[in-house]
Structures are given as structure tokens and as C-alpha cells.
Amino acid sequence: MDIILSNTNQDPIYEQIAHQMRTQIVSGILKEGELLPSIRALAKELRISVITTKRAYDELEREGYIETIAAKGSYVATRSHEQLKEEYLKKIEDHMRSIHLLAQFIGLSEEELGMMYQLLTEGER
Amino acid sequence: MESAIHCSNLKKSYGSFTLDINDLHIATGTVHGLIGANGCGKTTTIKLLLGLLFPDSGDLSVLGSHAIGQDTEIRQNIGFIVEDASVPSLMNAKQLSDVLKQTYHGWDQGRFDLLLKQFQLDAKKQYRMYSRGMKVKLQLAVALSHQASLLILDEPTSGLDPLARDEIITILSEFREDESHTILISSHITSDLEKLCDYVTFLEHGRIRFTREKDELLDEFRLVQTTHQMEADIDSDAIVARRDGSFQVELLMRAQDVPSFVEARRLNLEELIILLSRKGGAA
């Protein structure tokens, strides 16, 4: 698991942790059923408050990404990978629908849209 | 939650200064920061908790003991740093450990030697020859070598260089991994140590202005940097504190009160405390 905390990032620390873990669960870097570090161990490693790491775990648990078993620890939830992928696909579909709508307003062709997407991904590389 | 420290209506006066801690509760397993300006009563509070001073009135309980001044058994479980710790100036660390071996049942010589090495402290050098930073490190090494479950640290990073501060944060993070361990740290203004704190208590003129969960406190406020002209459009009741410059104005506001036409950013604890100290606003 990789977690990089940034002081310049405007997101609160717990959100930075939750976001990075979420990404790693969805992409399969953190595998279903994998044991996660304890709240105290993670706080120790990141040198932050225990309440902060607990909050990150609580949020991930509420969203169903992880499961906590009393006296055993927290695990990546078993529902994970496939279902999460499904959720993300749904989200992408929603975004596409709004892109489609916006493109229609200004009469943007599919070709032009494709080019915009290409430019965007090239910029990331 | 079980409490490591609890104070109620605790009073101590010196001349014109009165410390009045009406309610302070520190739960076992947490890291608690005691912050405030010079002379706000942090050191007095810590000395009362360590039994180095006796309160004029009120009740305090430390690890379940209501008379910490007389309770040498309970004091075995407390590691501390205070500025004027009376370490005999002609003693070196080796001789000090010979004395402490007799003092603490839980004295762990191996741990102490390891910490001396880690802190690069010369065990043969007399205490008076140590720099301020070395004296603090020696006290910390002692505090961590007798299996204490509670650390009470008065300004543990003052006078230390950034490298040493960093080492101390690592060591305190490790100590805190055990959930029966509690840490109270005081600091005149917050430092990098703030990151470890679960809760902060802000003292002002001998009184507790507030005790808050740190994350919650930081989530609550935003800093708006804007022009005097733009400020005219902001509801003045929503401004908690302010700092006026010639070319700009900085406004402390609650996150939900920030209007959408201005830029706002989160503050760190130090910035927040400075702004809150400027004005007696609520938090």
C-alpha cells in the first residue's frame, strides 16, 4: 500500500488517506481480503493522529471498501473488485451522458470529442 | 472512555496570576496538546499534574491517583520533561542511570543505553556540559526507559533542531502505538508535534479557552485572503477574526460561512491559534 500525504493538498489528511486507499482497492493493488495495517500502526507510520487514521478507515468502511472485524483488524472488503468496477463504470456512464448533452448544445462532433479526449490523455503521459 | 488525567475546578494563584482549569479530561490512549502563549499557565498545569506543585483548591486525578504529590507508586508510571528538571549538574548520564535504577522498578538499562546512542548523547559527559537540546533529549531518554504509560512533556521540542524534533516525533509515534499509552505535550505555539495530537486544549490567561478534537477544529475554519474592497460584500458577523494589511485583508471564517465569490484555504493549527488569539472569538 502506498500513501503519500501532502501538506499543500487542500484536502484534509483523512480524506487524502481514504482517497488513496480507495484508488488502490479499485485498481486491485490492494486485494480482496487483504489485511490492512491497524489504525495505530498506520498513524505511527504516517506520524499523524490516531483519530485521523480512524476517520479514514471509518469512511472507507461506511462506503463498503473495507471491513473491520473486532480484535482481528481491517480487511479489504470481499465485495470489492468486480462490484467497485461496476460502480465506476456507472459513474463514467453518467459523466458521458453529460458530455453528450453538452456536446449537443454546441454541435461538437464525435470526432472532435475524440480528439479532445486524446489530447487530455496525452497530457497525462 | 477511561481517563488518564482529569481536573476539575483546579486553581493555583501566584500574585496576580491565577490558573483556573475548570474541566480537563484526557482519555487513555490519546495524544493531547496543551497550547497557548508564554505565561498562559501551561507549565503550572504540568507541574500540578506531576505533583511538583500543589493546587490551592479543586480536584485532579492522574492515572487514578488524587494525590499525585504523595503517590510515588503512581509516579513510577509517568515519564516527564520539565524545563528545570533538577538533574545534578556534575553527574553524567551513566551516573544518573545508576541512581534511576534504584528509583524506578521498571528501569530498562538496555533501552536507556539504546536511546543515548540514538540521540548521540555522550554518557560520560557531565550534565552541565550538555547543550539545551541534549538536556531535553536526556530527559526524554529517561522518560522512555522506565515503562511509563503516561508521558507529560513540557515543551519537549523547544531548543531542538529540526532533525532532533523529527526523531522525537518518530519516538513518540512508536510510544503511542500501544493503546494503553497516553501523551500530554505542551507547546507555546504549535510545532510539527501538532500532527500527532488527537485533541488540543488552548489555554489563555490561565483559563481553558477550548478543548477540541484537532481534525474537527481544523475542518471548521478557513482563511479568506481578499481585498478591502471585496470585503464590503462579506457579512461582517461571519468574520471570526481578521488581520489587516495595507494591500490585503485576511479573514478567519467558518467553512460554511465562506461566500462563493472569494477564495478560501484551510489553515494549519499554528495559523489558526494565532488568529484566534487576536480576537476573543468563540471556537
Image (tube, coloured by chain):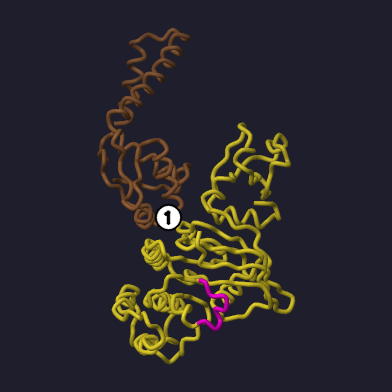
User: Chain ID for label 1?
Assistant: A
| Residue at image mark 1 | A48
Residue range in magenta is B64-71
User: Counting other residues with Cα less than 10 Å from the Cα at mark 1, is it few (<14), some (14-19), or many (20 or more)?
Assistant: many
Question: Residue A109, percent across and down?
Answer: 37, 8
Q: Could you tell me which residue is drawn at 48 percent across and 61 percent down?
A: B31
The colour applied to the residues of chain A in this rendering is brown
The colour applied to the residues of chain B in this rendering is yellow
Label 1 amino acid? Ile
Question: Residue B113, percent across and down?
Answer: 30, 79
Is B151 above or below relative to B255?
A: below
Question: Residue B80, percent across and down?
Answer: 47, 75
Is residue B207 visible in the rendered structure shown here? yes
Is B180 above or below relative to B246?
A: below
Label 1: element kind: loop
Residue B147 among those drawn in magenta: no
Q: Which secondary structure is most common in the magenta stretch?
A: loop
Give B209 or A104, whichever is nearer the viewer. Answer: B209
Q: Could you tell me which residue is drawn at 39 percent across and 87 percent down?
A: B96
Judged from this view, the residue extending furthest toward the bottom is B90
Give B107 or B259, whichever is nearer the viewer. Answer: B107
Residue B69 among those drawn in magenta: yes
